[in-house]
Amino acid sequence: MTDPTTGLTSLADLTARQLMAGYGKGDFSPVEAVRAVLERAAAVQPRINAFVRVDTEAALAGAEASTARWLAGEPLGLLDGVPVSVKDAIPVAGGPTLRGSTAPPGPGPWDVDAPAVARLREHGAVFVGKTTLPEFGWKAVTDSALSGITRNPHDPDRTAGGSSGGSAAAVAAGAAPLSLGTDGGGSVRIPASFCGVVGLKPTYGRVPLFPPSPFGSLAHLGPLARDAADTALLLDVISGADWRDWSAHERAEPVSPGLAEGVKGLRIAYSPSFGGQVAVRPEVAAAVRAAVTRLAGLGAYVEEADPDFADPVAAFHTLWFTGAARVVGRLPSERRAALEPGLREIAEQGARYTALDYLAALDVRAALGHRMARFHRAHDLLVTPTLPITAFEAGAEVPKGSGLRRWTGWTPFTYPFNMTSQPALTVPVGTDSAGLPIGLQLVAARHRDDLVLRAAYALEG
């Protein structure tokens, strides 16, 4: 039955901000909203397989506590009673973190929250479950021996992307309006683009990480949501220092208050193909170009300009594959044979790199960071397609018939900005002829997370 006020069919379809407003007015309670989300999760799980586990009992207990706080007029914070899911690479106290692997997680007691989870708990968020990822998050699609294949809510025959594929699919399907993901080469932005939601890789250090990633400072933790305003809200909650992460920024100004400032006067560089280096599918190119035209119509100064760097994939592979070697090297030797073959392959390659190879890759990374810092002296934002394609068949690392070997072959717009530590966000800007979402990527200078969110918010308006 459709709600005459919202025009929606379920509380599961409301944004976090709509839920908070409804709680405040007494239109409905956190218990009602969380029940609706749990019902949606149960309904969509057989079709899309977004969850490793759904914590029904704990979620309802959290919802009841939140409802009591609202009735007493004492909500905890910015997200009291809002359902949230968490990628199962991020610790949540009360259960194991499996990281997409069948390797035993250890004996527990599993009593530590990651910093971002602790912030959410402080603000009263309700945790509904842990979402799927590939084994140790090694690739940009989501399937594993542990949980099987995670599928796209828009077409279950297609991939949800990865490695935060479960989080993106859950948000897109209404199984919690907010989710936490990690992004080491595009792992928030890729599935968000494929599933038609907003995904942000914040400036490195804005959101603290613990435990540290074996992939080092390539790895960021970021929000996924249905729109830019919810993304900004979640970012504000999880940002700021934590003593457990020595690299975390001491302070982070909230971004939500400035969302509506718009793009008027911003200098935007539009790079449709990184100077012809990337073959972009025509439907993707057209949707992104139309969105760029909208930005110009909103008062931005737009010019076609490329950041003009060579594809850093070889250096990225050195950094990524050595991280994989670090992951695998921590496992007992008898367990390594059970790893996914692709992960085992890149780990073996990573183990062959020398310290000099690694330092050479860091030199490439530093040069790329310098180039982008200079680029942003002339341009407030860089706009690209998030991906050159839309979602392909589920269960494959690369599109069939593409001739590609690794996932980095079809993600050329995402991993460079993990190397530079910049904020990068994907926002949906349409669909292709098959009804599959198309994403536009916004990139800003380090510490200007506010700009990518302002531009995304403007595009949604």
Image (spheres, helix red, strand yellow):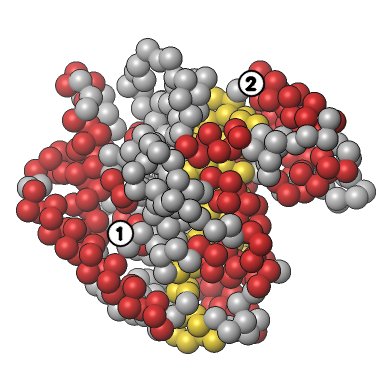
- Who's the residue at 36% across and 27% down the image? 101
Under mark 2, the amino acid is Ala
Q: Residue 277, how many percent across, how many down?
A: 31, 74
Q: Which residue is mark 2?
A: 58
- Who's the residue at 44% across and 51% down the image? 250
Q: Nearer the viewer, residue 67 or 354?
A: 67
User: How many discs mark residues in the rendered view?
Assistant: 2
The quadrant in which residue 227 appears is: bottom right
Which quadrant would the C terminus be assigned to in this image?
A: bottom right
Q: Residue 281, how many percent across, how many down?
A: 45, 69
Q: Nearer the viewer, residue 120 or 318?
A: 120
Quick one: SS at disc 2?
helix
Q: Is residue 118 above or below residue 317?
A: above
Under mark 1, the amino acid is Met
The quadrant in which residue 401 appears is: bottom left
Residue 50: tell me if it is visible.
no
Q: Is residue 328 above or below residue 8?
A: above
Q: Is residue 448 above or below residue 274?
A: above
Q: Which residue is mark 1?
A: 419
Q: Earlier in the sequence, mark 1 or mark 2?
A: 2
Q: Residue 276, how many percent across, how many down?
A: 34, 78
- Who's the residue at 22% across and 50% down the image? 319
Left or right side of 317 for 89: right
Classed neighbour count for the residue bearing mark 2: other residues with Cα under 10 Å, few (<14), some (14–19), many (≥20):
some
